[in-house]
Structure formats: structure tokens, C-alpha cells
Amino acid sequence: MGQIQIVQGDITRLEVDAVVNAANSTLLGGGGVDGAIHRAAGPDLLAACQLLGGCPAGEARITPGFRLPAKWVIHTVGPVWQGGEREESALLASCYRESFSVAKAHGIASIAFPAISTGVYGYPKQQAAEIALAAMREWVDDFEKITACCFSEADAYRYRELCRECI
């Protein structure tokens, strides 16, 4: 049985099998987590992403991690928040489900997620955390460790409040 861990910190420094990138649909880098992962992984990540031809919202793609401690990067494109009436919650849940599915297919035992869509995409943080943790609980038995990597201490606190069984 696996465990869900909540940490506050830099996802690019985590020693896990795979980190999830909250990417844009081009997969060619951007701001926030996406930019940080691209910078830390180096130019080979951009070259690998160019070969993928993009990714629609709710889906996931995988590349090597290159210069990251993580062997793999799973890129997923979250929804842009538009008030909740455009299937945003289903798309966000799909990001987690598809990322877990790709990870399992590649024999990944430990995976770390950022708070997908909560930056410039504007998804409400509380709702996003609830969706993330529901997905993590669903898949916890398929992985040794699932990490929710929160950028701020306030976000980590939010996750801990929602997940008393998490470490």
C-alpha cells in the first residue's frame, strides 16, 4: 500500500521517479511550474517536447527528466478556470487520472504533482486540492508514494487540512 505525502517546496528538486508538469498545450515551456521544470531539465526537454506535437487539456504525455533528479516528466494540460460551467472539474480530474495511467504504464513507483491549474489558469485552490486529493486516494494503492508538492506553505496547509491521513 502506498502513501500520500504533502510537501512545500520546489518540485524540480524532488527525488521521485516522475514529476508532473502543469504544462500548456504546446508543451514548449511557459511560466510557473512549467518554466521551472523546463529550466531545471535543460534544453533536451524542449527538444523532446517538440517531438510530441502538443497535448490537449485533460491528457498527459511523458518525456525523460534529463537534468532533473526525476527520471521522467509527465506533462499534463489543466483547464483554464472559466467559472466552473465548462467542464473544468472533469478536465482537471482527467489530468490526474491520465498522469497516473501514464505513470503506471511506465512502471513508475513514486510521482509528484504540483497544484495543476491553480496558477495563471486561475482554478480555485480549494476545489483544485479536493479534486487532486480524490484522485490521489483513488490511485494510492498503485504507487509506493504520491507527493503533492505545494509551492507555498498556505497551499501545503490547505492540502493537510483536507487529507488527515497524508504524511
Image (spheres, rainbow, N blue to C red):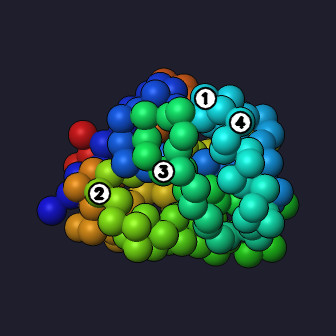
Q: Which mark is residue 43?
A: 4
Q: Secondary structure at mark 3?
A: strand
Q: Which mark is residue 72?
A: 3
Residue 74 placement (x, y as % from top left): 55, 56
* Residue 137 seen by the camera: no
Amino acid identity at mark 4: Pro
Q: Earlier in the sequence, mark 2 or mark 1?
A: 1
Q: Are there few (<14), some (14-19), or many (20+) residues within 10 Å of tag 2? A: some
Residue bearing mark 1: 40
Give the alpha-carbon distance from disc 3 to disc 4, as whole Å: 15 Å
Q: Secondary structure at mark 1?
A: helix
User: Residue at the location (60% across, 35% down)?
Assistant: 41
Q: Earlier in the sequence, mark 3 or mark 4?
A: 4
Residue bearing mark 2: 109
| Relative vertical location of residue 62 with respect to residue 146 in this rendering, above or below | below
Give the alpha-carbon distance from disc 4 to disc 2, as whole Å: 26 Å
